[in-house]
Amino acid sequence: MKAVIQRVKHASVEVDKDVIGKINNGFLIFLGVCNEDTVVEADKLLAKIIALRIFKDDNDKTNLSLKDVNGELLIISQFTLYADCRKGNRPSFINAGNPEHANNLYEYFIESAKKENLVVQTGSFGAEMKVDLCNDGPFTVVLDCVDGKIV
């Protein structure tokens, strides 16, 4: 399972010109799932994301976590994180999880985040989405979880 986490001042996602998710201060998470991923990877990845201390404290040091700043989450499914560009110029997505499996883990990840008492907004799995954001920093972190370990 892969995640691209962007610390944002605000972010929103729209489908068919309708805003379906919107957050203020927090993380925009692009989440990719492969067929080998399980709830173990989802749990490990979510725990790491919540614990990341990448918000600034009073001394301007990145020392605060999402919960420390009452941060919000916007979680967007992103199968293209598994793009394989090694051959030719057209990416292959053979490593991305099949849609049913990927959607199940995406929904599990969302429900798990909600259980952490966080404000959680989402995109729409499989939809054509437009994402708008104000990256704070900019600050972007890429996490990959394989066999239950952050690598």
Image: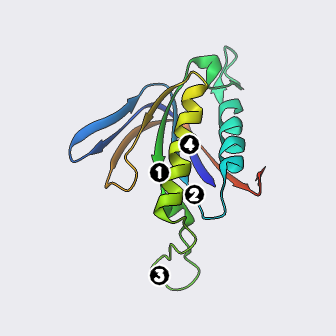
Query: Quadrant location of the N terminus?
Result: bottom right
Say which residue appears at 52% left-offset and 48% top-offset: 106
- Residue 108's disc is 4
Sequence order check: which comes first, mark 3 or mark 2? Answer: 2
Q: Amino acid at mark 3?
A: Asn
Sequence order check: which comes first, mark 4 or mark 2? Answer: 2
Q: Position of residue 37 (x, y in %)?
A: 65, 58
Q: CA distance from mark 3 to mark 2?
A: 23 Å
Residue 83 seen from this side: yes
Q: CA distance from mark 4 to mark 2?
A: 12 Å
Q: Amino acid at mark 2?
A: Val
- Report the mark closest to the observer, 4 or 2: 4
User: What secondary structure is marked by label 1?
Assistant: strand
Q: Which residue is mark 3?
A: 89
Q: In the picture provided, is 36 more to the left or to the right than 110? A: right
Q: Amino acid at mark 4?
A: Tyr
- Give the answer, above or below, for where 28 lies relative to 9: below
Residue count near mark 2 (Cα–Cα under 10 Å), binned few <14, some 14–19, many ≥20 = many
Say which residue appears at 33% left-offset and 54% top-offset: 127
Q: In the picture provided, is 128 more to the left or to the right than 10? A: left
State which quadrant residue 90 falls in.
bottom left
Residue 53 seen from this side: no
Q: CA distance from mark 1 to mark 2?
A: 8 Å
Q: Amino acid at mark 1?
A: Ser
Sequence order check: which comes first, mark 4 or mark 3? Answer: 3
Q: Position of residue 145 (x, y in %)?
A: 71, 53
Q: Position of residue 101 (x, y in %)?
A: 53, 59
Marks 4,2: beta carbons within 8 A: no
- Residue 77's disc is 1
Q: Which residue is mark 2?
A: 33
Q: Position of residue 131 (x, y in %)?
A: 36, 45
